[in-house]
Image (tube, rainbow, N blue to C red):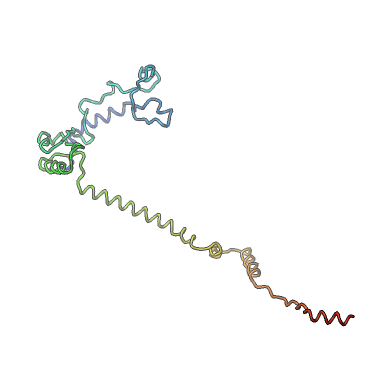
């Protein structure tokens, strides 16, 4: 497979870009009214549809008057003309200066490899094939992005995990206390925590002592 060269039809592509700026953007009817309808174009088919009848004040519809320039019609954005390929023998019909190959989606892995090998010999550019080097570069860029995202997520999770591990009382104690109010609260807490002194209660007199006292009174 030949490497991508400069677009062979630069002039035609520039003309197409310039003409496209003056064209309207065709939107599906009622797409501006309902969220469920996408803007992608659909042909209006109703008998009384005002867009189909091209009534004044309604958006324009797709018609032959809006065609692109004949030079650039059917060109791929790369500047080549697409040619569908099903087997290696079809590559010999392609002109590598102005045409590029597109491998059909029905082609299997074995035949696809043969087409790619033949395209390298004939220096034909394949539109729907990315070389291994480009794939490796894209994969490296993706891995770097994912690693950066993971690092940022871990940094965010660390302080939250530390807080969860501690109890509420430990979290409160860890916080710095400021000013006189903080000191007063500390002293009050210390007083509450200090164990109260136990007062010795007089022992209740036994049954024998009570009986003796009763006998003396009599």
Q: Quadrant of residue 182?
A: bottom right
Q: Quadrant of the C terminus?
A: bottom right
As drawn, 166 above or below 78: below
Residue 53 figure quarter? top left
Query: In front here: 206 or 61?
Result: 206
- Left or right relative to 100: residue 150: right
Residue 195: horizontal and vertical position, in percent?
A: 65, 73
Name the residue at 15% across, 36% down: 86
Q: Quadrant of the N terminus?
A: top left
Q: Quadrant of residue 19?
A: top left
Above-or-below relation of 183 to 213: above
Q: Observer-nearest residue: 56 or 190? A: 190
Q: Give the farthest residue toward the right.
A: 218
Q: Residue at x 26, y 24 (%)?
A: 67
Closest to the observer, 83 or 183 = 83
Seen in the picture, residue 10 relative to 171 is either above or below; the reply is: above
Taking the spot 70% from the left edge, 75% from the top edge, the residue there is 198
Question: Which sits in the foreground, 6 or 100?
Answer: 100
Callout count: 0
Q: Is residue 175 left or right of residue 26?
A: right
Residue 120 in the image: state x and y as whole percent: 12, 43
Image location of residue 60, percent across then percent down = 35, 22
Residue 149 in the image, given as x and y percentages of width and height: 37, 52
Give the residue drawn at x 21%, y 29%: 74
């Amino acid at each position: 497979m030949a490497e991508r060269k400069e677009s062979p039809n630069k002039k035609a592509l520039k003309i197409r870009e310039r003409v496209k700026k003056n064209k309207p953007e065709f939107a599906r009817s009622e797409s501006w009214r309902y969220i469920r309808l996408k803007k992608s174009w659909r042909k209006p088919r109703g008998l009384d549809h005002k867009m189909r009848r091209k009534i004044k004040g309604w958006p324009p519809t797709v018609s032959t008057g809006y065609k692109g320039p004949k030079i650039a019609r059917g060109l791929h954005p790369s500047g080549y003309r697409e040619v569908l390929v099903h087997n290696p023998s079809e590559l010999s019909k392609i002109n590598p200066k102005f045409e590029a190959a597109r491998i059909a989606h029905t082609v299997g892995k074995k035949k696809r490899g043969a087409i790619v090998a033949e395209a390298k010999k004939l220096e034909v550019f394949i539109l729907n094939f990315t070389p291994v080097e480009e794939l490796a570069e894209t994969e490296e860029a993706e891995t770097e992005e994912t690693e950066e995202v993971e690092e940022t997520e871990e940094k965010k999770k660390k302080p939250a995990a530390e807080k969860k591990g501690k109890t509420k009382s430990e979290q409160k104690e860890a916080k710095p206390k400021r000013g006189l109010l903080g000191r007063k609260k500390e002293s009050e807490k210390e007083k509450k925590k200090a164990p109260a002194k136990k007062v010795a209660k007089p022992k209740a007199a036994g049954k024998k002592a009570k009986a003796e006292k009763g006998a003396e009174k009599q």
